[in-house]
Image (cartoon, rainbow, N blue to C red):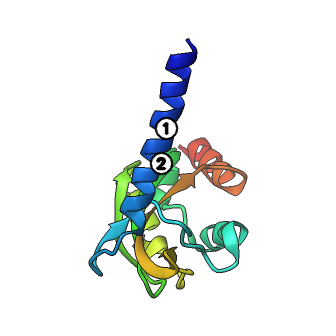
């Protein structure tokens, strides 16, 4: 049992070392990393990111009418200069919601870029965008249903 535990621990350390070596070696300028020493950061941090999303996402009217709720998972690249590029829907919800998520992510301000060995690099970033009917949205839906 002790040997198995020791082998498992050694395997984990070897795996971590190999992963770190792959991320810290010299790479071509166009490589896009998934994991880096310092991940990209939205200006002002996560609270500012959530505020940006809340202020800019407009729930599509058709999604309200069809009572669509859920999460769109969006993938994008934070470039070396902090700009956002290659915005794509990884997990769709509803076409209008997917398009709205892409629209808002595409208009984000520049981020602090990710780094490897102290140098800025391109980094994949995944961001879930939640669409949830609440408050006024539900009231509008209820009024429309009553009139029918």
- Which residue appears at 42% of the width and 68% of the height? 24
Q: Is residue 28 above or below residue 7?
A: below
Image side of residue 41 versus residue 7, left or right: right
Q: Splitting the image into 4 quarters, where does residue 22 fall?
A: bottom left
Identify which residue, 61 or 2, lies in the foreground. Answer: 2
At a point 72% along the width and 67% down the height, the residue shown is: 47
- Give the residue drawn at x 41%, y 53%: 19
Q: Which residue is mark 2?
A: 16
Please give the count of numbered marks on the rendered protein.
2
Where residue 48 appears, as percent x and y from the top left, is 69, 73
Report helix, strand or loop for mark 2. Answer: helix
Q: Is residue 1 left or right of residue 86?
A: right
**What's the CA distance linking mark 2 and mark 1?**
6 Å
Label 1 neighbourhood size at 10 Å, few (<14), some (14-19), many (20+)? Answer: few
Q: Is residue 125 visible?
A: yes
Using the rendered image of the protein, determine whether residue 78 is visible from the camera's viewpoint. no
> Which class describes the residues within 10 Å of circle 2: few (<14), some (14-19), or many (20+)?
few
Up/down of 143 relative to 40, above or below: above
Q: Are marks 2 and 1 in contact (CB under 8 Å)?
A: yes
- Residue at (64, 80) in percent of width and height: 43
Q: Which residue is mark 1?
A: 12
Q: Nearer the viewer, residue 111 or 118?
A: 118
């Amino acid at each position: 049992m002790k040997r198995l535990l020791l082998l498992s621990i050694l395997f984990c350390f070897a795996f971590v070392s190999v992963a770190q070596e792959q991320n810290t070696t010299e790479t071509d300028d166009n490589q896009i990393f998934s994991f880096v020493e310092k991940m990209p950061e939205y200006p002002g941090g996560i609270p500012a990111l959530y505020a940006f999303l809340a202020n800019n996402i407009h729930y599509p009217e058709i999604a309200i009418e069809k009572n669509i709720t859920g999460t769109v998972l969006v993938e994008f690249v934070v470039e070396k200069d902090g700009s956002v590029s290659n915005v794509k829907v990884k997990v769709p919800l509803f076409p209008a919601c997917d398009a709205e998520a892409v629209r808002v992510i595409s208009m984000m301000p520049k981020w602090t870029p990710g780094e490897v060995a102290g140098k800025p690099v391109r980094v994949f970033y995944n961001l879930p965008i939640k669409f949830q009917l609440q408050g006024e949205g539900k009231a509008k839906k209820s009024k429309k249903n009553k009139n029918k």
